[in-house]
Image (tube, rainbow, N blue to C red):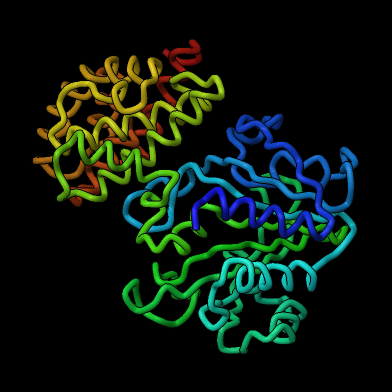
């Protein structure tokens, strides 16, 4: 099933159940506590907090998101992506747990044809009610797992909407890892839908990952091979002329996809805020291209974006000089704070990239010492010391 059809199937299903489609919100939220819209509910946050009144009690959306908390997992797992689309249904003082759970099961099994016997769910460890409701809906106790606050209590990451949640997983089979359910954190069990029960207020916030659903319904191995992403992945593979480093191919593809989306929102590379996220994504892409033997600037050719092309050219000299110094330092053992600071301050080599390269070679980095040197440097710059 193509991604467009997955989206339309979801929206049609909830339209038939009285939900109003709200326009996609900006990737840049009107919220100083967030860099990007990281979930489908972000544009609707004022409705959950009571700052604004929703146009009606039942809403639905298709929202493009950017989430960087999992950046170190990109390419190494089959399910993580920096940018993705979230499909969601929401209720404000209307229906609550049983309806959202029942509809999720109905859409997954009847709308998308997913085998109910391969579905698992997790619930918050103290949420007896939700476990009983899943059992009433026909899920056996052995495929319902209780997890703690880290896994099954959702919040936006700052003071605001929050509540216990229940996640729905699909068992992809032994090929993808060991059994034992979602609690084992295996690639085998893919989270496809998150149901958040906002309390107090009895509000519902759900998010189904379009990219992950496409992975399942299109029969591909990872989210970078779905129809929305595979053309870019193919271009990256063709340009490098190699197929022996799939992790780097996926990192480049993922980061370029996210970068194009971010640039399209008017963000430009910078050393702070949203611009730093963009710069970090592009520089990681460039580094992995060099690992694959691509030495000339190619991001402009891959994306057709002049902003991205300029950033690549600007980073070239930094990468060459910094890489030489870093390789020399890595051969001597753990990286001390002064070396990391010199790479960053004198040569403009990002500390995140230093840490990543060092980790690949099993070399420890004194990040705490670096942070102290950076703070001292900032104080000197402000004229507070010296």
Which quadrant would residue 128 be assigned to in this image?
Answer: bottom right
Is residue 225 shown above or below 308? below
Q: Residue at x 35, y 41 (%)?
A: 231
- Is 362 left or right of 92, judged from the image as shown? left
Which quadrant would residue 317 be assigned to in this image?
Answer: top left
> Foreground residue, 74 or 335?
74
The number of callouts visible is 0
- Looking at the figure, which quarter contains the C terminus? top left
Q: Residue at x 44, y 44 (%)?
A: 228
Q: Residue at x 17, y 22 (%)?
A: 296
Is residue 9 shown above or below 293? below
Is residue 71 shown above or below 77? above
The image shows residue 178 at horizontal and vertical percentages of: 36, 79
Q: Residue at x 59, y 69 (%)?
A: 168
The image shows residue 12 at horizontal and vertical percentages of: 71, 55
> Foreground residue, 249 or 130?
249
The image shows residue 43 at horizontal and vertical percentages of: 72, 39
Residue placed farthest to the bottom in the image?
141
The image shows residue 268 at horizontal and vertical percentages of: 48, 19
- Is 297 left or right of 371, judged from the image as shown? left
> Foreground residue, 87 or 43?
87
Residue placed farthest to the top in the image?
383
Which quadrant would residue 116 be assigned to in this image?
Answer: bottom right
- Is 109 left or right of 30, judged from the image as shown? left
């Amino acid at each position: 099933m193509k991604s467009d059809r997955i989206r339309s199937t979801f929206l049609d299903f909830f339209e038939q159940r009285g939900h109003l489609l709200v326009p996609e919100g900006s990737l840049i939220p009107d919220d100083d506590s967030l860099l990007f819209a990281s979930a489908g509910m972000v544009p609707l946050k004022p409705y959950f907090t009571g700052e604004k009144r929703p146009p009606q009690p039942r809403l639905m959306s298709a929202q493009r998101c950017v989430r960087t908390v999992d950046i170190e997992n990109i390419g190494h797992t089959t399910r993580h992506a920096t940018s993705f689309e979230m499909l969601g249904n929401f209720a404000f003082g209307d229906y609550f747990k049983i309806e959202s759970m029942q509809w999720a099961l109905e859409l997954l099994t009847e709308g998308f044809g997913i085998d109910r016997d391969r579905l698992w769910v997790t619930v918050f460890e103290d949420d007896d009610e939700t476990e009983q409701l899943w059992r009433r809906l026909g899920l056996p106790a052995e495929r319902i797992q209780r997890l703690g606050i880290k896994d099954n209590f959702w919040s936006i990451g700052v003071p605001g909407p929050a509540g216990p949640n229940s996640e729905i997983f699909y068992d992809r089979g032994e090929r993808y890892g060991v059994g034992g359910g979602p609690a084992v954190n295996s690639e085998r069990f893919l989270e496809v839908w998150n149901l958040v029960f906002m309390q107090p207020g009895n509000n519902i916030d759900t998010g189904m990952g379009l990219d992950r659903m496409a992975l399942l319904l299109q029969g591909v191995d990872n989210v970078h091979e779905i129809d929305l992403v595979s053309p870019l992945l193919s271009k990256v593979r063709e340009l490098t002329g190699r197929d022996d480093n799939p992790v780097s191919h996926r990192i480049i593809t993922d980061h370029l996809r996210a970068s194009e989306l971010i640039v399209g929102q008017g963000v430009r590379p910078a050393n702070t805020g949203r611009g730093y996220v963009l710069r970090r994504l592009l520089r990681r892409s460039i580094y992995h291209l060099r690992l694959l033997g691509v030495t000339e600037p190619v991001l402009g050719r891959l994306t057709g974006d002049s902003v991205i092309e300029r950033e690549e050219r600007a980073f070239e000299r930094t990468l060459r000089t910094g890489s030489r110094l870093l390789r020399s330092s890595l051969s001597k053992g753990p990286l001390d704070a002064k070396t990391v600071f010199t790479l960053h301050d004198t040569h403009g080599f990002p500390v995140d990239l230093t840490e990543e390269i060092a980790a690949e070679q099993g070399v420890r980095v004194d990040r705490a010492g670096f942070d102290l040197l950076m703070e001292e440097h900032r104080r000197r710059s402000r004229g507070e010391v010296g």
